[in-house]
Image (cartoon, rainbow, N blue to C red):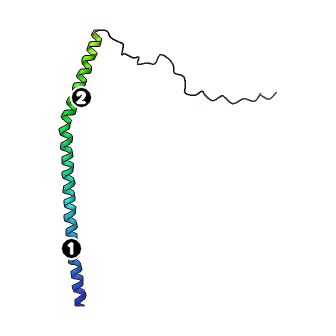
Amino acid sequence: EREERLLELARRESDTRAGKRYALGAAHRAQSEKSRQEVMLQEVLSDLGTVQSQRRDASERRGRELQRRCKEADWSNATSAIQTVRRRPAHLPAPLPAQSPAPPG
């Protein structure tokens, strides 16, 4: 019986050590993931200013081009917002079924 108690005590001690190792590994994994996400966030935020600046520059160029075309009354690139020509359907509608003549009476 003493031997069984010693075995049980050793097993518990082994389980405790294994649990602590697992918990330590999980903590390291969580910290690593948190660090990875922080790095990714910083990359996105640092790139955000550049992207916004590029968009602003492109928008300003388009605005200047539109002002120039308005001054010169250059409408060559303008297209109608409404289709004036009706498009043909991609396929013809199915024919109606033939109707039988009405019964006399």
**At 20% from the left edge and 52% from the top edge, which residue is drawn?**
34
Q: Residue furthest top?
A: 72
Residue 15 percent across, percent down from the top left: 23, 74
**At 51% from the left edge and 21% from the top edge, which residue is drawn?**
87
**At 22% from the left edge and 29% from the top edge, which residue is drawn?**
54
Judged from the image, the secondary structure of the residue bearing numbered disc 2 is helix
Q: Is residue 71 left or right of residue 45?
A: right
Quadrant of residue 21 in the image? bottom left
Is 89 located above or below residue 2 in the figure?
Answer: above
Residue beneath label 1, please?
16
Judged from the image, the secondary structure of the residue bearing numbered disc 1 is helix
Between tags 1 and 2, which lies in front?
Answer: 2
Q: Which mark is residue 63?
A: none
Looking at the image, which is closer to me, 80 or 57?
A: 57
Residue 68 visible from this viewpoint: yes
Quadrant of residue 9 in the image? bottom left
Quadrant of residue 88 in the image? top right
Is 10 located above or below residue 91 in the figure?
Answer: below
Q: Is residue 84 left or right of residue 100?
A: left
Residue 66 percent across, percent down from the top left: 28, 16
Residue 105 visible from this viewpoint: no
Dots 1 and 2: beta carbons under 8 Å? no
Is the residue marked by circle 1 packed among few (<14), some (14-19), or many (20+) residues within 10 Å?
A: few
Can you say which quadrant of the picture contains the N terminus? bottom left
Residue 26 percent across, percent down from the top left: 22, 62
Q: How many marks?
A: 2
First in sequence: mark 1 vs mark 2: 1
Is the residue marked by circle 2 packed among few (<14), some (14-19), or many (20+) residues within 10 Å?
A: few
Q: Which mark is residue 55?
A: 2
Q: Amino acid at mark 1?
A: Thr
Can you say which quadrant of the picture contains the C terminus? top right
Q: Amino acid at mark 2?
A: Arg
